[in-house]
Image: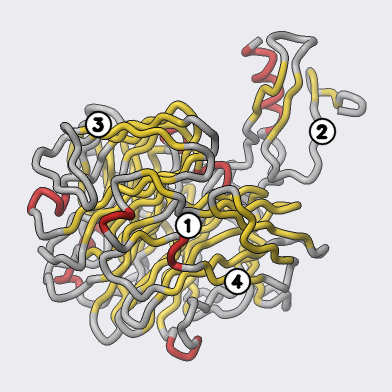
Amino acid sequence: MRRFLLSFVLIFCTINALFAQRDTDHWIAPFYTSVTGYTNAVYLSTDSTTPFDVRIYNNNNLIQTVSVAKGAPVSYTVPASLINGTTSTDAFTVGTKGLYLKGDKPFYCTLRSAQTAHGEIITSKGKAGIGKKFYVAATPSTANSSSNNFTAGILATEDNTSVTVSWNTAGLVFIGGTPGGNSQTFTLNKGQSYILAGNHLTSANLNGFIGAKVVSDKPVTLTNGNANGNFATNTSDGSDLIMDQSVPVERLGNTFAMVKTKATNPTLNMEGGIIIATEDNTEIYINGSTTAVATINEGQWYRINETSYVEQNPGSGHFNMFISTSKNVYLYQFIGIQGFSYNGGYNYIPPLNCFLPRKIDEIGKINEMPGIATSNITFLKLNILTEAGAAVTYSIDGGPATTPTAAQGPYPLTGNTNWVTYAIENPTGNLTINSTKAVTAGINGGYGTAGYGGYFAGFSSIPIIAKKTGECVPGIILEVDDSYETYQWYLNGNPIPGA
């Protein structure tokens, strides 16, 4: 039976039709904000030239229906009460915060949160963002502050979902309740959520929840980070909303590339990233070195410093980094943007994969944040990663394809000759990226004292196969995820008529 299914998978490996986070279903779990005043909005875009409806739900209740099409992305402001926890009664208890979005065709979805001083982009991974096992990420904080915290929000996709969250650090203090030990178990129904958060006035809370394990018996989604957090060397710099959606462990990998963003003072260490291990004896290598910089165990973490970036072509100002590990890990890139002061954010970084899509179509309203004038967004950068030898173009608002200049790339990646990177400053509008080989891309931006980032196209084009009914052939029905508008089943290399 397994060999039978595998034959379908191998055939599908030759088809590159899935546009990563582009999906028909998106879930966004809530998070706890120790700093209030955020405006939250979902931004939706698609490659479909035919308009279609997207329905937005909270706790299984329809709150809005919007129409989206290529060239006509939409944003919808979400009441803060539906996505942000702000009081002790919102945390450490079963609640109803969180969003589910369902479209008639595949679409991209980001939650963008902003206020005058802080901002972040949470990129929905669609069905790739739901699963049964995760490890929590946050930044290793450097500042004791009641306005900083760690936060992890879990949203259920099915009724009667049992979830256990466990951690290794003693002495954690949670907002809203006290666990009986180093774990907390709760049951959620579809659309319900649970937030675990703790402010940074307690020393154990600064880093002790990083690497906490989330295990459920049915698929859930996890939003994790700090709201707010501070990871700069200087504790007076860098306080910001630092948040992204996680992915389950089966979506992880062990080879990564990052492009440095826009921090200009390396002594503050506002760049780099954090690695979280999911298995014992995980070795970490930087820029192709054969000597591990660290070996960490399950649930432990390692901070990659900004100094690990390599400037490609001296004087170019283009810095990138190659990271590899002996076992699959989580990697989040730290973002540093110099505005009126230094500010930050982070992105979940997808592993490099030759089955990544060749097209990202389209990232809507790339230079917008809710409630912020676009004229104030003066720091924006598009980073593109693709396989070496690829021809890359991008277009804005459906305009002509533009080939990046030599100053924009491609730049080599020290330690891995198979991939190259690009950086394009201050893109605007609705963006489409094309490559003749596998491609992924991220946005880093900022305004005033806010920094943020979002990554797009992070998952391979290999479809997920779900068994709906039947235990063996021929009484089996196979389906793939809804990111495909059409597909064809093959058997022994030949198309099955009508399948």
Amino acid at pointer 1: Val
Helix or strand or loop: what does disc 2 sit on?
loop
Separation of residues labelled 3 and 4 (CA atoms):
39 Å
Residue with the mark numbered 4: 75
Horizontal side of residue 234 vs 378, given as left or right: left
Image coordinates for residue 21, horizontal then vertical, percent: 58, 51
Residue with the mark numbered 1: 420
Helix or strand or loop: what does disc 3 sit on?
loop
Which of discs 3 and 4 lies nearer the camera? The answer is 4
What residue is drawn where x is 66% and y is 51%? 102
Amino acid at pointer 3: Glu
Separation of residues labelled 1 and 3 (CA atoms):
31 Å
Q: Earlier in the sequence, mark 3 or mark 2?
A: 3
Helix or strand or loop: what does disc 1 sit on?
strand
Helix or strand or loop: what does disc 4 sit on?
strand
Residue with the mark numbered 2: 488
**Front position in the image: 191 or 360:** 191
Separation of residues labelled 3 and 2 (CA atoms):
40 Å
- Is any part of residue 421 visible from this angle? no
